[in-house]
Image (cartoon, rainbow, N blue to C red):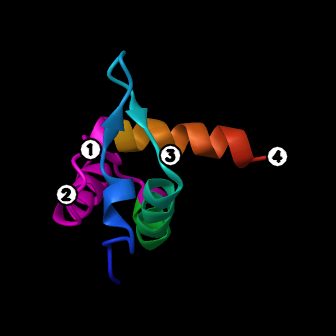
Amino acid sequence: MDLVPENSSSANKRTTAGGRVKWSAALEKLLIDLWQEKIEDLRGPRKNSHVYMEMAESMKEAGIELGWGEIRTKLENMTKKYRH
C-alpha cells in the first residue's frame, strides 16, 4: 500500500496554538487506511500500544510525524463520533 498521499503537503502535521494536531482530510484518510490494515491486531487480547506505535512509524515513513498517543486519541474520537 502506498502511504504517501497524492498531495503530501496537505497531509503534513499541523498543530494549533494549543499544540493539538489539526487533521486534514488527507491525513484522516491515511489514518483510516492504516486502521483498516491493523484492525484485527487492535481487536486482539493484547494491549494496543504496540499497534499504535507501528501506525505512527508507518506515518513517519510517509513524512508525517505523529506520536502513537495522538493516533490513539484520534481513532477513539472518530469511533465515538461515527459509531451509532
Amino acid type indicated by mark 3: Leu
| CA distance separating discs 1 and 4 | 28 Å
> Of marks 1 and 4, which one's residue comes earlier in the chain?
1
Q: Nearer the viewer, residue 75 or 64?
A: 64
- The residue carrying pointer 2 sits among few (fewer than 14), some (14 to 19) or many (20 or more) residues within 10 Å by Cα, namely some
Amino acid type indicated by mark 2: Lys
- The residue carrying pointer 4 sits among few (fewer than 14), some (14 to 19) or many (20 or more) residues within 10 Å by Cα, namely few
> Please, what secondary structure does the residue beneath circle 3 have?
helix
Residue at left offset 60%, top offset 44%: 78
59 is higher (above) or lower (below) than 80: below
> Please, what secondary structure does the residue beneath circle 1 have?
loop
Circles 2 and 1 in contact, beta carbons < 8 Å: yes
> Of marks 2 and 3, which one's residue comes earlier in the chain?
2
Amino acid type indicated by mark 1: Leu
- The residue carrying pointer 1 sits among few (fewer than 14), some (14 to 19) or many (20 or more) residues within 10 Å by Cα, namely some
> Of marks 3 and 1, which one's residue comes earlier in the chain?
1
Q: Nearer the viewer, residue 57 or 44?
A: 57
| CA distance separating discs 3 and 1 | 13 Å
Q: Dot 4 corresponds to which residue?
A: 84
Q: Dot 2 corresponds to which residue?
A: 60
Give the residues drawn in magenta, as a range: 42-69
| CA distance separating discs 3 and 4 | 15 Å
Residue 44 percent across, percent down from the top left: 44, 59
Nearer mark to the viewer, of 2 and 3:
2
| CA distance separating discs 2 and 1 | 7 Å
Q: Dot 1 corresponds to which residue?
A: 66
| CA distance separating discs 4 and 2 | 32 Å
Residue at left offset 67%, top offset 38%: 80
Tell me, yes or no, whether the highlighted magenta stretch contains residue 5.
no
Residue at left offset 43%, top offset 72%: 37
Q: Dot 3 corresponds to which residue?
A: 75
